[in-house]
Image: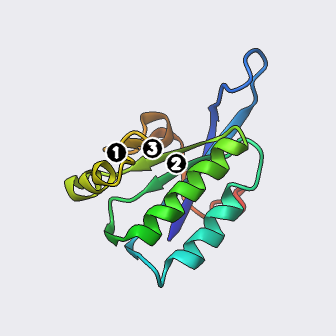
Amino acid sequence: MSENHTKPEEHRSGGEGARVRPATVVALRGEIDLLTAPGLAARLDTLTSRPHPDLVLDLRPVAFIDCTGLGVLCRTRNRARARQGRLRLVADSEEFLRLLRTTGLGGAFDVQPGLPAPVVEALVPAGAPGEGAA
């Protein structure tokens, strides 16, 4: 799992005077299943523990995701929303999109085929000077 922090992106959840928060991009690889879900859930819980989390999960390199993995995504979405934040998924796999539709989660996530333009423009490599690991 690799993680990049972006420069602040405007996040309007509170109207006038809304705070500017950085987006965190997490690229997931391999499989998200019963064996890997606990560690991933713990990391995503940490990333969604702050107020107004803005999390982008890049799932394009993920080869497999099972119902346990979907549960982790749902939990992460719920935690982000409970803290007035957001979760965006980046996925271009027709198989994954079909899985979301089949399980009734087709409209539950903000799914995009590529990284959002403001996030791509603002990506800072992990470990860059001035950027701490979350």
Can residue 127 be seen here?
Answer: no
Q: Residue sitting at 51 percent across and 67 percent down?
A: 2
Q: Of discs 2 and 1, which sits in the foreground?
A: 1
- Packing grade of label 1 (10 A; few <14, some 14-19, many >=20) is some
Relative depth, front residue between 127 and 66:
66
Left/right of residue 46 with respect to residue 92 in the rendered view: right
Find the distance from the CA under tag 2 to the CA under tag 3. 22 Å
Seen from this angle, which residue lies furthest left?
A: 94
The residue indicated by pointer 2 is: 123
Q: Are marks 3 and 1 in contact (CB under 8 Å)?
A: no
Expressed as whole percent of the image width and height from the top left, the position of residue 36 reads: 49, 80
The residue indicated by pointer 1 is: 114
In this picture the colour scheme is rainbow
Expressed as whole percent of the image width and height from the top left, the position of residue 95 reads: 22, 58
- Per the image, label 1 sits on a secondary structure element best described as loop
Q: Residue sitting at 43 percent across and 38 percent down?
A: 116
Find the distance from the CA under tag 3 to the CA under tag 1. 14 Å
Where's the C terminus, which quadrant? bottom right
Find the distance from the CA under tag 2 to the CA under tag 1. 14 Å
Name the image quarter holding residue 65.
Answer: bottom left
